[in-house]
């Protein structure tokens, strides 16, 4: 491995290497090393980082009472780069490479709470059954005017015409061309970084875009979504605007999602196990859907990890409020797209664009896996508008966390330590949020109550 990586770096004239570690929120942390020092570290195991990197909150703090999992004296973990993730980093004056790293303890065992390891664990469960999941994510994001004071609301930026969008422009080609320079640079940089993005469309929100990824291996796609977010934000800054993957960045605009299309192939024959030889749906397909319907509401924080995430889930906003499933029905939490038998799949519409891609994909796949293994039976497929049915998803992060920790079927497979750490991080973030007095409170309570 060391020889291959060294040759790759030398051939491309790489001077620096960004060693990336995805934390629990999907934020990229890590180290930047001179290329020669990076190559040397592969042989002498000197590429290390404090183990607390996996318990940092989104506010930069740390949860309490988790020392039995991550000791408070904060020992190092060893980083091992995954060669399959090595790629040129676009946009740098100094020739730079990205590489995503896995973490191991001093005994050489993987750090089991690491988000990338969680997804690997889920894929191993599928492999043990002779199954290979295939996914295709869709990531939505907004372009917004630079916001230098967080007390002020976000606003759409002007496009090439010099005017900002004020109304819905879903699938608008003229609207899309308003940001042509940004879009072209995103494509160029993604091509350089070898990200397999497919189509880009203008979504319903003002200056809201969506990119579809070509279907493939779940771990590889999670890596790509992680790097895509980085690239999009950097391109936006080059053009004097921000790009945001917040689930609900503007009160009067739709939220941003990360829809996950998923199917399962047989490892031996490569056939879609969701379809029988006669083209009909299989019992495994229905059980996979049943697992999603039954378990996803219990582990929703993995799909909606922030207080802002729940602002997205409102009726008639292309975001689900319950977990019905239906054929080509975008009001449902789980949509079965129109497809031929070999491409039969289900689209999970719960995840926000703010979700950690490793954990969201792992959560979606583990629910389907449990359904398949336990031969669950789904409820009747919904015909009609799911927004006319009762809300069954939690309305807040606080309510969602209460259900999350009690989900024994998923906890037993993903690990007690992971559940405890994730819950502690989100509880700490929730406490920090609830400690802030909002402008709404000052506006409506200051001089009235």
Image (spheres, rainbow, N blue to C red):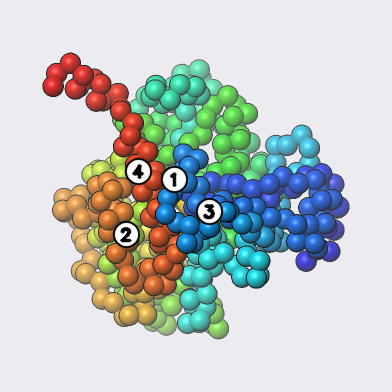
Tell me where residue 210 appears, x and y as whole percent.
47, 43
Q: How far across and how far down the image is residue 198, in percent?
A: 55, 51
- Residue underneath mark 2: 404
Horizontal side, residue 187 vs residue 305: left or right: right
Q: CA distance from mark 1 to mark 4?
A: 16 Å
Q: Which residue is mark 4?
A: 430
Q: CA distance from mark 2 to mark 3?
A: 25 Å
Mark 2 neighbour class, 10 Å CA radius: few under 14, some 14 to 19, many 20 or more: many
Q: In which image quadrant can residue 279 be found? A: bottom left
Q: Tell me how far mark 1 sits from mark 3, CA to CA.
A: 29 Å
Dot label at residue 354: 1
Q: Residue at x 28, y 77 (%)?
A: 376
**Where, quadrant-wise, is the C terminus in this rendering?**
top left
Label 3 with label 4: CB-CB less than 8 Å: no
The reply to whether discs 1 and 3 touch (Cβ–Cβ < 8 Å) is no
Q: In terms of depth relative to the viewer, which is nearer, 408 or 388? A: 408
Frontmost of labels 1 and 3 is: 3
Instruction: Name the N-terminal-most of marks 2 and 3.
Output: 3
Q: Which residue is mark 3?
A: 72
Q: Which structural element holds mark 4?
A: helix
* Mark found first going from the N terminus, 3 or 4: 3
| Residue for point 36% across, 77% down | 372
């Amino acid at each position: 491995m060391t020889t291959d990586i060294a040759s790759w770096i030398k051939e491309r004239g790489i001077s620096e290497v960004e060693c990336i570690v995805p934390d629990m929120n999907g934020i990229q942390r890590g180290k930047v090393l001179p290329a020669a020092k990076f190559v040397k570290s592969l042989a002498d195991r000197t590429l290390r980082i404090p183990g607390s990197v996996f318990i940092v909150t989104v506010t930069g703090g740390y949860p309490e009472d988790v020392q039995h999992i991550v000791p408070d004296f904060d020992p190092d973990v060893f980083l091992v780069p995954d060669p399959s993730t090595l790629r040129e980093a676009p946009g740098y004056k100094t020739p730079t490479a990205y590489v995503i790293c896995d973490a191991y303890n001093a005994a050489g065992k993987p750090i089991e709470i690491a988000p990338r390891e969680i997804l690997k664990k889920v894929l191993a469960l599928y492999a043990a059954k002779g199954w290979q999941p295939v996914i295709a994510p869709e990531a939505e994001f907004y372009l917004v005017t630079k916001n230098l004071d967080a007390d002020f609301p976000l606003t759409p930026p002007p496009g090439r015409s010099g005017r900002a969008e004020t109304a819905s422009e879903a699938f608008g080609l003229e609207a899309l061309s308003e940001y042509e320079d940004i879009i072209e640079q995103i494509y160029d940089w993604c091509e350089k970084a070898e990200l397999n993005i497919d189509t880009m469309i203008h979504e319903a929100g003002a200056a809201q875009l969506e990119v579809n990824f070509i279907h493939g291996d779940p771990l590889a796609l999670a890596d790509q979504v992680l790097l895509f977010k980085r690239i999009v934000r950097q391109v936006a800054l080059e053009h004097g605007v921000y790009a945001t993957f917040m689930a609900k960045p503007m009160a009067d605009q739709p939220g941003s999602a990360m829809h996950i299309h998923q199917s399962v192939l047989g490892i031996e024959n490569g056939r879609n196990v969701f379809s029988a030889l006669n083209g009909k749906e299989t019992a495994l397909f229905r059980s996979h859907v049943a697992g999603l319907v039954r378990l996803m509401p219990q582990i929703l924080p993995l799909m909606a990890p922030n207080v802002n995430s729940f602002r997205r889930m409102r009726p008639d906003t292309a975001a689900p409020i319950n977990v019905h499933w239906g054929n080509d029905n975008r009001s449902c939490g789980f949509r079965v797209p129109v497809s031929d038998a070999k491409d039969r799949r289900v689209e999970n519409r719960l995840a926000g664009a703010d979700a950690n891609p490793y954990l969201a994909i792992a959560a979606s796949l583990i629910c389907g896996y449990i359904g398949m293994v336990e031969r669950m039976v789904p409820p009747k497929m919904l015909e009609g508008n799911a927004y006319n049915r009762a809300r069954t998803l939690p309305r807040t992060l606080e309510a969602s966390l209460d259900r999350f920790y009690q989900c024994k079927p998923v906890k037993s497979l993903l690990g007690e330590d992971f559940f405890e750490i994730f819950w502690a991080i989100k509880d700490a973030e929730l406490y920090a949020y609830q400690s802030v007095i909002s402008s709404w409170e000052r506006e409506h309570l200051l001089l009235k109550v």
